[in-house]
Image: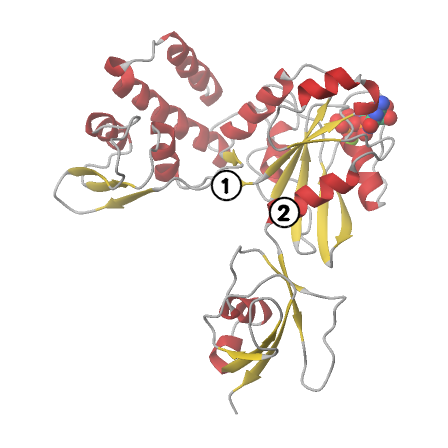
Amino acid sequence: MSVAQKIAEIEEEMARTQKNKATAKHLGLLKAKLAKLRTELLIGGKSGGGGGGDGFDVAKSGDTRIGFVGFPSVGKSTLLTKLTGTFSEAASYEFTTLVATPGQLHYKGAKIQMIDLPGIIEGAKDGKGRGRQVIATARTCNMLYIVLDASKPMTHKKIIEKELYGFNIRLNAKPPGMLVRKKDKGGIAFTNTMSEKPRNLDLETVTAILREYKIHNCDVVLREDCTPDQLIDVLEGNIVYMPCIYVLNKIDAITMEELELLSQVPHYVPISAKDEWNFDELLETTWSMLNMIRIYTKPKGQIPDLSAPVILHQKNPTVEAFCMRLHRTLAKEFKHARVWGNSVRHQPQIVGLSHVLQDEDVVQIIKKV
Ligand SMILES: Nc1nc2c(ncn2[C@@H]2O[C@H](COP(=O)(O)OP(=O)(O)OP(=O)(O)O)[C@@H](O)[C@H]2O)c(=O)[nH]1
Ligand SMILES: [K+]
Ligand SMILES: [Mg+2]
């Protein structure tokens, strides 16, 4: 039996199994088996077809990377051409795009690499078409645009999400709030640091899942009400968490009433790639979800170069993170920094490595002599 067949078999059994307290442990076990098989597919393993776990070979450039994922002919290539000016062929027939096509957009001083990808269909992750190559490339991105055709059924969104989930991509989610610490002896300890009782996990389910991973001595500490799937994610360890915008394209082809209904979807931005409608909102939303912060450098005796900020990805980056971004050894030679901007009261202010910077601060590093 191939890995894909084994996966299908387990998925069927899970669908047959009723969800209740008595079956929780068994379901947890099936989920763990499923995750292991998916990882086997992902890493290449013994699976047939689909081009292995490797993505398209696209050189990284710029400060961040956004991948366009969606069914065929939803308008991904049209969008790339309009946003970046890099031509990617668009046509009314499916699978026009066969390879990854990168373009670059300059926005608020940042260089954003955008990658137009071939369309995917249901079953992509298991080797249909170029699906696995597409999703493997999607895993290398900092953010995804899931492009949807507003005039097509919204079930397409679910299908794409499922394909990405099966390739260990978690959309608009944070790593689970739990600690899993393997030890040499002492058995399995399951503790909870929340004020309320956990609703989704108990010692029995945790033990069953850990056993599937051949772990017999381990501390599991809950900081949030995590699910069995989240425990499995932590054990698998190769999960990618990334922000995603549902880009609802072709709104020029639907009525206002239909558009109103579609606006219920979270993280969605309606656009028309053809008519360039609502690109402002798309880019504003992109910027805020990427959590990018611009820091301007100021060499001694010169004015800061406001056209070329250094981009940091953390929400609250420190001066140390800024130094690391500039050069690996800079933090070691660091004496102090002068900072102008919103993060300081005095302009400039002398700060140390632990100072937290804000968007558009100007920083001058003073090295030890
Ligand atoms: N009405 C309308 N049509 C659009 C829009 N954007 C793209 N199209 C049309 O939709 C068709 C498919 O566009 P593509 O850009 O090739 O779509 P794609 O997602 O790249 O397709 P594949 O590469 O085949 O996966 C073309 O005929 C486009 O002209 C839009 O905003 N409105
Ligand atoms: K097309
Ligand atoms: Mg295309």
- In the image, 256 versus 98, the foreground residue is 256
How far apart are labels 2 and 1 at the CA level? 19 Å
Residue 258 position, x and y percent, is 73, 16
- The quadrant the N terminus occupies is top left
Q: Quadrant of ligand 3?
A: top right
Residue at which label 1 appears = 240
Mark 1 lies on a secondary structure that is strand
- Beta carbon at label 1 within 8 Å of ligand 1: no
Q: Residues within 10 Å of mark 2 (few under 14, many from 20)?
A: few
Residue 318 position, x and y percent, is 50, 66
Q: Amino acid at mark 1?
A: Val
Q: Residue at x 26, y 46 (%)?
A: 181
Q: Residues within 10 Å of mark 1 (few under 14, many from 20)?
A: many
Residue 344 position, x and y percent, is 55, 71
- Compared with 81, 36 (above or below) is above
Residue at which label 2 appears = 288
